[in-house]
Image (tube, helix red, strand yellow):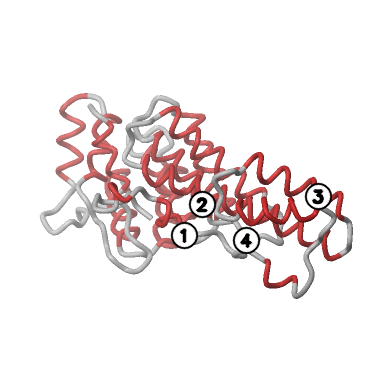
């Protein structure tokens, strides 16, 4: 089965658009053994998308959890998936519960908790076809924790590492374009952070330290939008002509740039991976 079936991960946008998609069901197919198990699963799905009246089974719990999840009731869905994992750890549906528990934490903005669960899923099931999605979500957990350029930039570095690993291990995944764009956005953020630190040194007249930061910026992030300004500022410092005037006018954008601005023009008309 091609990873395309992994599009079970098409998720509901936080804006409210629901995505109860058939791909969620496709996730279960490789997890089951034999046609009987597949038939059993589909027997629990009503035409309207609900679960059967039978309660307390792995099948009914999974359908209930998915229904709650796809209606944006992430806390309720999380309770169901946790119940499923605890009561039926060896069920065919437990794997789905593991992944959707991580997704619930992600949409509840519990990013550290989601990160732990995504990493555990990858460690336990390294060959599962959902792994590209899991790596993408790992990157998103770091990405959502990026603050501003005057704060610790570690989350931006972790974002780059996670998305770069996705590009290495699954270059043909549906998340490739967004991963590349988010890497570029994070690199621009890190360049802006270095520039911000350099301006601090300039304000305190610590010019050698400012030069060191600017040299690092130009060397490591030559394609960043702030690089030309950094090059000019570095040349002025080396010439013994530090800038004067309102230092606030030099400051770059404080927040993470919009990743969509880094998507190639040729790809703009293509459907983007889940946000």
**To which residue does mark 4 refer?**
147
- Residue 272 position within the rendered picture, expressed as x and y whole percent measured from the top left: 31, 51
Kindly report the distance in space between the C-alpha atoms of the residues bearing marks 3 and 2: 29 Å
Residue 185 circle label: 2
Q: Nearer the viewer, residue 176 or 5?
A: 176
Q: Secondary structure at mark 3?
A: helix
Answer whether labels 1 and 2 touch (C-beta < 8 Å). yes
Q: Is residue 218 left or right of residue 68?
A: right
Element type where label 1 sits in the image: loop
Of labels 4 and 1, the one closer to you = 1
The residue sitting at 33% across, 39% down in the picture is 93
Relative side of 164 to 241, left or right: left
Q: Position of residue 170 (x, y in %)?
A: 39, 30
Q: CA distance from mark 4 to mark 1?
A: 13 Å
Residue tagged 1: 258
Q: CA distance from mark 3 to mark 4?
A: 32 Å
């Amino acid at each position: 089965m091609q990873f395309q079936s992994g599009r079970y991960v098409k998720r509901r946008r936080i804006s409210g658009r629901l995505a109860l998609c058939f791909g969620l069901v496709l996730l279960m197919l490789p997890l089951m053994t034999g046609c009987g198990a597949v038939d059993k699963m589909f027997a629990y799905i009503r035409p309207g998308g609900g679960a059967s009246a039978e309660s307390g089974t792995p099948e009914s719990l999974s359908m209930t959890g998915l229904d709650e999840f796809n209606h944006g009731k992430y806390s309720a869905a999380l309770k169901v998936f946790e119940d499923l994992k605890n009561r039926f750890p060896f069920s065919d549906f437990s794997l789905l519960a593991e992944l959707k528990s991580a997704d619930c934490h992600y949409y509840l903005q519990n990013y550290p908790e989601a990160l732990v669960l995504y990493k555990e899923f990858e460690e336990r099931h390294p060959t599962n076809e959902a792994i590209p999605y899991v790596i993408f979500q790992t990157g998103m957990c770091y990405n959502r924790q990026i603050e501003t350029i005057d704060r610790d930039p570690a989350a931006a570095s972790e974002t780059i590492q996670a998305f770069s690993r996705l590009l290495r291990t699954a270059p043909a995944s549906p998340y490739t374009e967004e991963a590349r764009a988010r890497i570029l956005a994070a690199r621009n953020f890190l360049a802006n952070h270095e520039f911000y630190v350099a301006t601090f040194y300039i304000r305190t007249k610590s010019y050698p330290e400012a030069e060191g930061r600017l040299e690092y910026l130009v060397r490591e992030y030559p394609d960043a939008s702030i690089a030309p300004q950094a090059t000019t500022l570095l040349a002025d410092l080396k010439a013994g002509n530090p800038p004067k005037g309102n230092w606030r006018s030099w400051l770059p954008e404080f927040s993470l740039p919009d990743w969509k601005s880094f998507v190639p023009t040729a790809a703009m008309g293509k459907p983007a991976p889940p946000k």
